[in-house]
Amino acid sequence: MARNTKQRAAVQEILDSADGPLLPEDILERAQPLCPGIGAATIYRTLRALRESGGVREVVTPDQRVRYEKDGPHHHHFQCRSCDQVFDIGGCRRAGTPLGARVPKGFQVEEHEVFLFGVCAACA
Amino acid sequence: MARNTKQRAAVQEILDSADGPLLPEDILERAQPLCPGIGAATIYRTLRALRESGGVREVVTPDQRVRYEKDGPHHHHFQCRSCDQVFDIGGCRRAGTPLGARVPKGFQVEEHEVFLFGVCAACA
DNA sequence: TGAAATTTGAGAATAGGTTCTCATTATCGA
DNA sequence: TCGATAATGAGAACCTATTCTCAAATTTCA
């Protein structure tokens, strides 16, 4: 049933080559040149389908917006306070409790998420 | 102009004694016994006033909801996957780059935020 | 190629949290 | 205690990201 449309291929390609999670509107913008006339509904539909089939994951950033990224190995995120863009940050080898956290007795840590804030290379 | 009402005192007291950021609805629920009849609008108005005067801060958790906590020293958060409650976690002494993060060349880190996920002591 | 069925684009509809409106009530200085 | 005025409660209004609707276009496969 799932058909190969150029709209879906474009969203896939955009997520695959992104260097951080993207807003639906970012994806729409980047998809325009690949699929002239593509609409927001298609972006949302495609993201939902990809999320449900497991290839894409939602990332809720502390600015309260939902971004999407290709599902992959654990990593952290950096958000630039100037341009708002979010970047992937590697270098975390532990999936459970991160270094330097003191968890109360009886709490079981299964995962963690880290956001860094500052200024990206392009804005600095 | 700012008057001392029991509604405001209740919200303040609830935030002061909380062991983690709270949802507006949680605050409303806890305020009911202290101020019978208190409404949601008052909670939101008071939170906004406290936020603007600097004593209270918003915390956007990865479940995409906004919670409120008393402004204070840097710390991390733990969210229970069973009861959804968020707890404060101490033990982070560095305000800038957390341990174990490899930031790309040219990026300037100013702050960080950490969320742990798992099961809290009460739910375990 | 042709028919069946999914996907698309546009705009309307939805949903949930938050803010606004306004009559009433409470606070606080004189 | 009184009066001026800020705060409250209830519900309407708002906001905006996301989903839905439906006719038209595309894809798929016989």
Image (spheres, coloured by chain):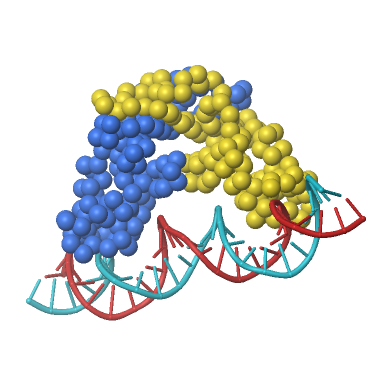
Chain colours: A blue, B yellow, C cyan, D red
* Horizontal arrangement in the rendering, residue B61 relative to residue A13 (left or right): right
Residue A91 in view here: no
* Rendering coords of residue B52 (x, y %): 57, 43
The C terminus of chain A lies in which quarter of the figure?
Answer: top left
Pick whichever, A42 or A52, lies toward us: A42
Name above or below for residue B39 compared with residue A119.
below
Q: Which quarter of the rendered picture does the N terminus of chain A lie within?
A: bottom left
Q: Residue at x 58, y 29 (%)?
A: B72
Residue occupying image coordinates x 42% and y 23%: B96
Q: Is residue D9 above or below residue B24?
A: below
Q: Quadrant of residue A116?
A: top left
> On the rendered structure, is A5 left or right of A62?
left
Side of C12 relative to A5 (left or right): right
Q: Position of residue B54 (x, y in %)?
A: 58, 37
| Closer to us: B100 or A93 | B100
Q: Provide residue D13's location: percent of width, then percent of height.
A: 55, 69
Q: What residue appears at the point 21 percent right and 64 percent down from the top-left corner?
A: A37
Q: Which residue is drawn at the image coordinates 25% and 54% (left, top)?
A: A29
Residue B60 visible in image: yes
On screen, B30 above or below A107?
A: below
Image spot of residue B101 (x, y percent): 36, 23
